[in-house]
Each structure stands twice: as structure tokens, then as C-alpha cells.
Amino acid sequence: MRYLFVLLAALFLANISSAQINVSINLGSQPVWGPTGYDYVEYYYLPDIEVYYYVPKHRFYYYENNKWIYRSSLPSRYSNYDYYNSYKVVVNEREPWHNHKTYREKNYYYKIDTISSQYAIVVIQNIM
């Protein structure tokens, strides 16, 4: 009986020791222009230009010629885009461009006040 108890206890402990804990942290791979305070980020949505940035692979996803494509850099039409002072939305969803209409409609939008040449925050609708 004692032998059976020791055998069951050993099997139980062996089962516990083989359990794995999976923690994903991608602090080092986030771009310097990204928002701070997040341990893990899949995508940034840049609503000003309607582009997604995939943090793990450092890719930009944007709509062109009726389809979503990705590149390691944005096309020249975005060359004046200021990553550091733009609004970013953290998205931890797989392939968020499939829900692009929702993200586009339900996020904050920024408009430039051309009269005073200052940025004005205009809240259209908030998803939170």
C-alpha cells in the first residue's frame, strides 16, 4: 500500500512539474514611437492614416488596390506622417483589418485646425 501511495505521489508531482506557463512580453520589439505602459501589443491602429502596424514582425498593413497588403515601410504618400505625435490605438486581435469598419467608426479622430495651425482633438465616438 505504501508503495502505491509513493508511486501515485511521484506521478502527481511529475505532472505538476511538466506544466508550462506561457507569458508573452514584447517590450523590446515595440517601436519607440509607440505608446508606453503596455507589456504586450499585437497591433497599433493609426486612425489618422487608417493603417495597422504589426509589432512582432514590424509590418505596416494598409488598404491598396482593393485589398489589405503589408510592407516593412509605408508608401511615400505617408512620408510626412508624424508617428510620435499621432494618436495610436492598441489592438490585441488577430488580423484587425477584418474589422476595420468597426475600428474606423468607433475610435477618436483628430482634425487639424488649419486656422490656428494647432492640433485639435475632436471626439467623434468612443468605443470604451
Image: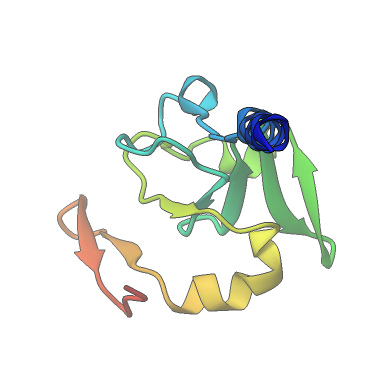
Residue 88 position in % (x across, y down): 40, 50
At 66% from the left and 42% from the top, the residue drawn is 60
Q: Quadrant of the N terminus?
A: top right
- Left or right: residue 29 compared with residue 75: left
Residue 37 position in % (x across, y down): 30, 36
Looking at the image, residue 41 lies above or below residue 56 = below
Instruction: Return the residue nearer the eye: 81 or 117.
Output: 81
Q: Quadrant of the C terminus?
A: bottom left
At 37% from the left and 76% from the top, the residue drawn is 127
Tally of marks? 0
Outermost top residue? 28
Looking at the image, residue 92 lies above or below residue 4 = below
Instruction: Return the residue nearer the eye: 81 or 36.
Output: 36
Instruction: Return the residue nearer the eye: 75 or 58.
Output: 58
Outermost front residue? 1
Instruction: Return the residue nearer the eye: 96 or 117.
Output: 96
- Left or right: residue 102 compared with residue 6: left
Residue 124 position in % (x across, y down): 31, 78
Residue 54 position in % (x across, y down): 63, 41
Coloration mode:
rainbow
- Left or right: residue 11 compared with residue 51: right
At 53% from the left and 55% from the top, the residue drawn is 49
At 42% from the left and 24% from the top, the residue drawn is 32
Looking at the image, residue 28 lies above or below residue 54 = above
